[in-house]
Image (cartoon, rainbow, N blue to C red):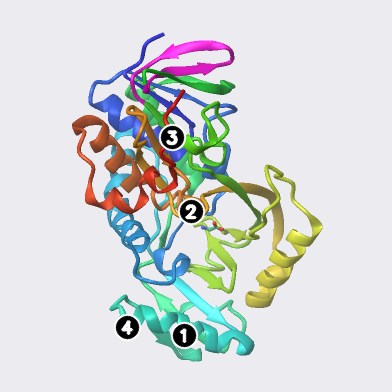
Amino acid sequence: MQSDIIIIGGGLIGCSIAIELAKGGLKVSVFDRGQLMKEASWAAAGMLAPQSELNAITPMFLLCQKSLQLYKGFVSKLQEFTGLDPCYRNEGFLQLAFEETAKALDKNMAWQIDAGLRVEKLTSSQLKKLSPTVSNKVASAYYLPDEHQVDNRKLAECILTMAEMVGVKFYLGAQVTEICIEQNKVVGIVANGERYYSAKVVNAAGSWASLFNLPKHFLPEVKPVRGQMIALKTEAGTLEHTLHFGSIYLVPRKDGKIIIGSTTEHVGYDKRVTPQGLEVLLSQAQKIVPKLASASFIEAWAGLRPATSDLLPVLGEHPQLPGLIFATGHYRNGILLTPITSSLITDFIVTGQTSEMLEDFSPSRFMLTAKAS
Ligand code: GLY
């Protein structure tokens, strides 16, 4: 079976690249080891929040910021084509701290203010007005108007609908075991024991991106980092803004559902939800919004964030294996980085030109100089 492009990984990143390429008339096949959109894309909370996730103006921050700027157009186009609403929200975030961590929060906000990012210090009465259900014990509060959110599961539905509309071919339950190389060039893959041909293979396999047959020094190492999550049902309007305090966040959906995240655990491919994880999330959530003590429990789950050793994504072509292109390792920012990743990787595949924005994320930073055998 011959495709113009093979994409390994049917999450938001893989499928959005597939859409762009298929729209341009290319024959695109997406292989997923399980079901589409059921790993990090599904497990996330959908925060679009460079200021909350990063702590300096770095190339990564700029990449995230650029992607955030693209988001509105990205979701509008999807909505226009599919008729589905991915529930993009731009109410902004509240960064909160109790007495014991107030100084740390002030310091964290200071670099953002120095860098000219929009951050507003709130008095307690301003906080009460903006978010009446937040605890009276909050000692420090800031409003970040430029941090947004999207319902990642709804976005996934939109993207899958769109992918079908533009003719992307999907192979599900397709375990890719081999990326085939001949004369130092990519020629295809082996999935479930069968060979599929393409001169271009995009590795968008998230936490599974380094589990193929190439020698280790030909693949950047991507490891899973577990995040446990909980969803509660409250009355619509209980929260309007995403709340962020320490490592915990509460992301409100329009219908009253509140997503609480998350733990950061190095436990391999273990997606269990644990009493300890749940306890941390629930106790912190109730501390910041006491009313949540009487909310209804909907579900709990865990996802695996794909992390490289420097916690930066791997984007671009392998320096020694033309045709092997990486779009993985997005760690905590996969939902946020979907539009920019799909745009830059598609441009590279179509034009052969690498954008300057990709330079700091090249796979070459992980490669040794050995040649493929
Ligand atoms: N971006 C949120 C998280 O990774 O927990």
Q: Is residue 196 magenta?
A: yes
Q: Is residue 298 left or right of residue 373?
A: right
| Among the two numbered marks 1 and 4 on one chain, the one whose residue lies closer to the N terminus | 1
Residue 21's x, y, as percent?
29, 28
Asked if residue 294 can be seen in this view, the reply is no
> Badge 1, how many Cα within 10 Å: few under 14, some, many 20+?
few
| Residue type at the position of mark 2 | Gly
User: Disc 2 versus disc 3: distance between alpha carbons?
Assistant: 39 Å
Asked if the residue at label 1 sits under 8 Å from ligand 1, the reply is no
Q: Residue 339: x and y, percent?
A: 33, 46
Q: Quadrant of ligand 1?
A: bottom right
Q: CA distance from mark 3 to mark 1?
A: 45 Å
Whether label 4 touches label 2, CB < 8 Å: no
Disc on the earlier residue, 1 or 2: 2
Q: Is residue 23 above or below residue 328?
A: above
Q: Which residue is mark 3?
A: 370
- Kindly identify which residue carries mark 4: 114
